[in-house]
Amino acid sequence: MSFHQIKCLHVYFNGFQSALWLRLLLWIWIGEQVDQVYTSHQNFHPHSIKIPGDITLGGLFPIHSRGPHGVNCGELKKEKGIHRMEAMLYALDQINGDPELLPNITLGARVLDTCSRDTYALEQSLTFVQALIQKDTSDIRCTNGEPPIIRKPERVVAVIGASASSVSIMVANILRLFEIPQVSYASTAPELSDNNRYDFFSRVVPPDSYQAQAMLDIVKALGWNYVSTLASEGNYGESGVEAFMQISREAGGVCIAQSVKIPREPTAGEFDKIIKRLMETSNARGVIIFANEDDIRRVLEAAQRANLTGHFLFVGSDSWGAKSSPITELEDVAEGAVTILPKRASIDGFDQYFTSRCLENNRRNIWFAEFWEDDFRCKLTRPGVKLDPEKKKCTGDERIGQDSSYEQEGKVQFVIDAVYAVAHALHNMHQDLCPGSHGVCSNMDPVEGRLLLDYIRAVNFNGSAGTSVLFNENGDAPGRYDIFQFQMTNHSHPGYHVIGQWTNNLRLNLEEMQWSGGDRSVPESICSFPCKPGERKKMVKGVPCCWHCELCDGYQYQLDEFTCETCPLDKRPAPNRTACRPTPIIKLEWNSLWALVPASIAMLGILTTSAVVITFIRFNDTPIVRASGRELSYVLLTGIFIIYLITFLMIAEPGVVVCALRRLLLGLGMAITYSSMLTKTNRIYRIFEQGKKSVTPPKFISPTSQLLITFVLISVQVFGVFVWFAVIPPHTIIDYEELRPPNPDLARGILKCDMSDMSIICCLSYSIVLMVTCTVYAVKSRGVPETFNEAKPIGFTMYTTCIVWLAFVPIFFGTAQSTEKVKTDSALPV
């Protein structure tokens, strides 16, 4: 078609939508290509099978593999090519011999070889649309000048195939332009479910979106959350992996470590690089693989070369299925591989049919001779072709399954179901359009493609395996899968074994699974191992399956898997740091050294004081006792006795009574002591001061007056303590801060009375006032006569007492503040 013609067409159809314009251009290009094919073939198709019939179906099969660069076709594919193609011929024979299905109508076929290459398949499939394009033959003349007699090509009403998704996609784009329905037996790419782009495409196998969901369910059932993906370049591999990744993202719980694509034309060493890249995330042992057989095999070979046998745990798609060819002589590397395959059954009738084929009864299959040579490893004699001396000559008496190995290919059932789906659709269409008619009536000549598509989508029958064959609104079959595992050891029959099924949900028998070396424990494929008790997860940004484990330290415990929380003040973390436990409560024990020493000294003091009291009582009326002021001496000794007694209250277990007695006696003992000494020093001072002025004695120097003054001074202390009782009743507290070291195992709560350091000083403040006042009077009385020997000892006592108190108060408060500062600094964040 010339540029001028296209330009004219563009002007003419300028008002049409761009999609219609592109479709028109493609139609014209196809017409020219068909003319070329038509002219070059001259109605003879050396690479196709022609079976005559009233209605013709097309067939696309990968009879040969992809050839090397520059060559379309390579080696013969016995199982995926010949088995599947013969399954179509077998189904046609069964349908044509069935008096109930399409009676008086014979189905024919035009079967083509795709050579596992999408571009070559596109060229071959142009054969199917020849009858739909009017060809101008006016300029064609025979040598005698007469117009040629050109046989009109058969009209293909539907196409069975193709196998590879990439091929089906390429062919579907052509067939939809001519409204030819297409039913695939093996293409599973999710892209083909797009009913807007591939509206004439249907398939009897479920799409990879179901397969991807099944594979994700397998990964989760095995407890894996970190896997890599591996895909062959092309629609099948890339769309399968994309479906798996999308479903895993939506479902959550599974992360993708590496997503590697195998090039369509891999270079030398490419697969070694792929294995090296997968090992960059060696924890991701699980590998989800959507790849063709050749790529699967080369991946296993590369893993074997890298000495990684048993490391990778493969989960293979239906392209791996239960095939032996990808793993031959690589069984050790493939051991434990879990594979998936649409639920299928072996068709006994096909086995009988295929094993009975021979060179004599299967001449309709133009590739059967090539299959015969490959299957029996022999060579057929052909005119003009010299026989290779290294190969034996084929006798023709060989038998499939007897002189060669035979196992039915996995997609045979689906090929048969695809042919029957079109046959049932044609049957239902014939009943509606040609009621009571024998053979094809005018309403079905020609068969309208869009109407036939509606009938195909509406079929529902039991297929060759006994399962229902039907399609949803997108032309997809329901998802039904068998799950296999390749096992070698500890089993009487090494090979693929069914371990589960998937029909919208997974049923997996983990007890029947075994891995490399016969191990039955499921290996791990996780990014990060679970954190130990007492450790929180610190997530890796952007990878929800990966984390670092951090220990909850100090007084923290594990609140949840992501959070550490500080225990309450009265608790400390459990040994595993998953909870808090009560902090042990301690008190001063009687058998402690800190109790025995003060108690011993206090006991000695009590005994000494008691001895003095007894002595005073015994010599109560003697002049020396009376001269010392026996009344005040008894009061002074009582105060001293109480001071010693308070030691035992400080050691005793805190309680309401003990705390009340501590408050009362702590200041009372000193108040009694200093009150009596103050009264004495005051009496001495007043006597000598008054004697300087007159001979009249001062007032209130009698024993009764002295006692009254002392008790008045003491009553001030007692009154203050009872006011304290009223404001803050005595009670116990547990101090958890005093013994809270960095190591929580050493933390203790101290049972004590609610008496703060300040309250103790306040309690003793009155005694300090009495002491200072007594000291003042002692200073003033320092000039008394030598014969009066009481004033100077009192003065000496008060001097030393003041010195001790002056040292005690700063040290006491300074130590308390330093301790508080240390606690505060340790609590500040670094």
Image (tube, rainbow, N blue to C red):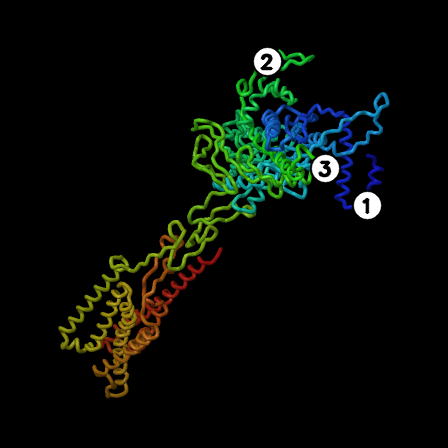
Pick whichever, 611 or 8, lies toward us. Answer: 8
**Residue 699 point in image, percent of width and height:** 25, 86
The mark that comes first in sequence, 3 or 2, is 3
The mark that comes first in sequence, 1 or 3, is 1
Foreground mark, 1 or 3? 3
Instruction: Evaluate whether residue 714 shows in this view.
Output: yes
Is 456 on the left or on the right of 762, as rendered?
right
Disc 2 crowd rating (10 Å Cα; few below 14, some 14-19, many 20+) is few
| Three-letter code, disc 1 | Asn
For mark 1, give the secondary structure. loop
Q: Label 3 belongs to which residue? A: 178
**Residue 446 point in image, percent of width and height:** 71, 35
| Three-letter code, disc 2 | Thr
**Marks 3/2: CA–CA distance:** 46 Å
**Marks 1/3: CA–CA distance:** 23 Å
Cβ atoms at labels 1 and 2 below 8 Å apart: no
- Identified at 38% across, 63% down, the residue is 815
The mark that comes first in sequence, 1 or 2, is 1
Pick whichever, 432 or 163, lies toward us. Answer: 432
Is 341 on the left or on the right of 614, as rendered?
right
**Marks 1/2: CA–CA distance:** 66 Å
Is 254 on the left or on the right of 203, as rendered?
left
Q: Residue furthest right?
A: 145
Q: Label 1 belongs to which residue? A: 14
Disc 1 crowd rating (10 Å Cα; few below 14, some 14-19, many 20+) is few
- Disc marking residue 395: 2
